Image: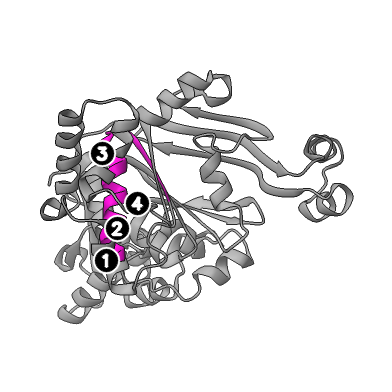
């Protein structure tokens, strides 16, 4: 499948200073948060209210897979339910395709969910007495789509997820991974622009989980969909996401690509999270290369034109291979036929450790 052509600058979901406080005194708690700057602990003590999401702002662009990662209780599942107003925010705005969900009538909100937003939960909740085809077509049935049309659409969605030969089977005949594929097909059948995924693979065996992660990313990109993917597993977020938001205690601590977060953790909490992550396929040449001038100052007799060449997006693993194969102790990084930097053994080791040469230069 070819990747769909999409406008990756278009923002489909825009969350602006989003709050969710649970409890009978949530309005009073929100007032005190605004006036007195109370934190989560004080809100619980004074009002017996729980701050689920605290001043969260994110943007999800068309064609992007945006992962929200955090441990249990971090607020990630609450946040994803605010994105389609399954939960009403205490403050802030959620704009979907420029439309404020809070300003929509119930009918318009149902239409938005049916047409523009699909959702897949950890528990896929298939109807046990319906076939795979009927389960995949269920959302279309609710919309009143005639049976021949909805079955044809659901069949096409099942084919996309590799279940074309299972349409007449029942959920109890499927493995856990296959059931999740049916859930994804059910979401895809409505052809939504946005897919919300709340830890859909967390209960699966590791091998099946990795397979579905790769299939989900490939399929989402091929169809040009945007996705918000909730996970407690940083490895999964890195494997799937274009960008990652890390949450703790309802707060988004840091947002960025995996490479940005690993090289520049916002605080000790994020640094601890990424400490055990392999850098081999995450950190690229553009982050570990030295400038040409810096290299020439340290190696004045070196002929850059004779160096082995690579691209700015070559990862650490590829750079190690090139270094081992080369007779020289440096690799030229080339963009548009121009040498823009040089990777040396020292800068390569910095990348393995998770340190950017840009950070070192800034220091």
Instruction: Tell me the crowding category of disc 3: few under 14, some 14 to 19, or many 20 or more residues within 10 angstroms, Cα based.
Output: many
Residue identifier under label 1? 175
Q: How far from the left and from the top, in percent, is residue 60?
A: 43, 38
**Badge 2 or badge 3: first in the primary sequence:** 3
Which residue in the protein does label 4 denote?
126
Disc 3 versus disc 1: distance between alpha carbons? Answer: 20 Å
The one of 360 and 257 positioned closer to us in this rendering: 257
Q: Nearer the viewer, residue 134 or 324?
A: 134
Residue at numbered disc 2: 179
State the residue at coordinates (27%, 40%). Answer: 188
Magenta segment includes 190? yes
- According to the picture, the residue beneath numbered tag 3 turns out to be 137
Q: What element carries label 1?
A: loop
Work out whether mark 3 precedes mark 1 in sequence or the reverse, and give the earlier one.
3
Residue 80 falls within the magenta-colored stretch: no
Indicate the position of residue 234 as horizontal and vertical percent values. 45, 65
Q: What element carries label 3?
A: loop
Residue 38 showing in the rendered view:
yes
Question: Marks 4 and 2: in contact by CB < 8 Å?
Answer: yes
Are the residues flagged by discs 1 and 2 in contact, CB closer than 8 Å?
yes
| Chief SS of the magenta region | helix
Estimate the x, y position of residue 58 in percent, counting from the top left.
52, 40
Closer to the camera in the image, 339 or 10: 10
């Amino acid at each position: 499948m070819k990747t769909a052509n999409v406008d990756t600058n278009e923002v489909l979901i825009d969350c602006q200073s989003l709050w969710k406080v649970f409890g009978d005194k949530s309005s009073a708690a929100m007032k005190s948060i605004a006036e007195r700057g109370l934190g989560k602990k004080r809100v619980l003590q004074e009002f017996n209210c729980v701050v689920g999401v605290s001043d969260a702002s994110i943007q999800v662009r068309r064609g992007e897979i945006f992962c929200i990662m955090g441990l249990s209780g971090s607020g990630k599942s609450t946040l994803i339910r605010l994105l389609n107003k399954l939960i009403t925010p205490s403050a802030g705005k959620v704009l979907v395709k420029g439309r404020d969900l809070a300003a929509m009538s119930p009918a318009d909100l149902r239409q938005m969910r049916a047409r523009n937003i699909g959702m897949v939960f950890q528990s896929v909740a298939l109807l046990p007495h319906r076939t795979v085809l009927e389960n995949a077509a269920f959302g279309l049935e609710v919309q009143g789509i005639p049976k021949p049309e909805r079955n044809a659409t659901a069949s096409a969605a099942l084919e996309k997820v590799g279940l074309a030969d299972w349409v007449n089977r029942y959920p109890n005949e499927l493995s856990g991974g296959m059931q999740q594929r049916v859930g994804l097909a059910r979401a895809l059948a409505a052809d939504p622009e946005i897919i919300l995924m709340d830890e859909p693979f967390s209960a699966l065996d590791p091998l099946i989980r990795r397979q579905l992660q790769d299939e989900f990313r490939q399929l989402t990109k091929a169809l040009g969909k945007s996705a918000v993917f909730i996970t407690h597993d940083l490895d999964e977020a890195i494997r799937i996401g274009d960008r990652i938001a890390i949450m703790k205690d309802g707060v988004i601590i840091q947002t960025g690509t995996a490479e940005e977060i690993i090289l520049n953790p916002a605080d000790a909490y994020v640094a601890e999270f990424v400490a055990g992550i392999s850098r081999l396929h995450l950190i690229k040449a553009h982050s570990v290369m030295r400038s040409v001038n810096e290299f020439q100052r340290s190696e004045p007799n070196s002929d850059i034109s004779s160096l082995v060449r690579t691209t700015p997006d070559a990862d650490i693993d590829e750079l190690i291979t090139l270094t081992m194969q080369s007779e020289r102790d440096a690799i030229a990084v080339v963009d548009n036929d121009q040498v823009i930097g040089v990777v040396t053994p020292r800068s390569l080791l910095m990348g393995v450790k998770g340190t950017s040469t840009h950070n070192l230069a800034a220091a």
